[in-house]
Amino acid sequence: MSEIDGELPDPALAAAVLEIESHAAVDGWDQKSRLYALVETAVLVEKEPALAAAMGLDESSAEGSFTPIEQEVDAGTPFETVLSSIVWPDTVHGCAAVVERLVLPPSADGQIPDDAAEAQAFAAEHPDRQEVRIVAGVTRAGATYCALRLRAHDDDQSVVGGNELVPELVELLRATLEVDPDEEMRS
């Protein structure tokens, strides 16, 4: 894996994102979007010892790491809409998402239609399109990490990582961790 930006990533978040990316790679391409809660492994071991044991986790493996827990997502709802409706409880330290998208070269920017359906058709038919799997993660502490794998270069050594590779997805994920001030005042 190669690192794109120069800022050092949060090692626990980077490890969780890469674990999720590796898991997604085993399932192959053309998968639905996925969403994961990231919980501190030490808290999981302490509060849910039976679950932790079933997952092969113990105190020695727990320190300074996150355990990704996949969430059920309605495949019939656009993923961005799903994300805009989520607010995580305090026990969730971060979250991560896996999405597959088509990307176009910068030279295609001025040619993309404004209509969403037309833009999607344009991208699907563009000769220079690339299919990419994106795994992005964020924490309540503000750390971010992303991993990208191109379908054309589908091997573990070609996965690219960095803190801010997909800023729009990072922002959507970050918003799921924000505390609603009205909700905070009621509690």
Image (cartoon, rainbow, N blue to C red):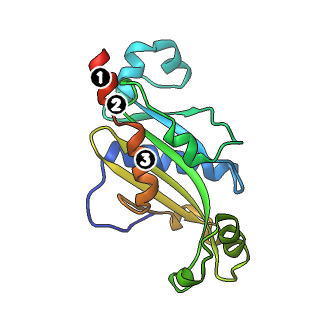
**Disc 3 to disc 1, C-alpha distance:** 24 Å
Amino acid type of the residue tagged 1 in the rendering: Glu
Dot placed on the residue nearer the N-terminal end, 2 or 3: 3
Amino acid type of the residue tagged 3 in the rendering: Gly
Amino acid type of the residue tagged 2 in the rendering: Asp
Q: Position of residue 98 (x, y in %)?
A: 56, 49
Asked if the residues shown at circle 2 and circle 1 are in contact, with their CB atoms under 8 angstroms apart, the answer is yes
Left or right of 10? Residue 97 is right
Left or right of 74? Residue 47 is left
Of circles 3 and 1, the one toward us is 1
Labelled disc at residue 137: 3
Q: Residue at x 46, y 25 (%)?
A: 57
**Disc 2 to disc 1, C-alpha distance:** 6 Å
Q: Residues within 10 Å of mark 2 (few under 14, many from 20)?
A: few
Residue bearing mark 2: 180
Q: Position of residue 117 (x, y in %)?
A: 70, 65
Residue bearing mark 1: 184
Q: Name above or below for residue 69 compared with residue 53.
A: below
Secondary structure beneath disc 3?
strand
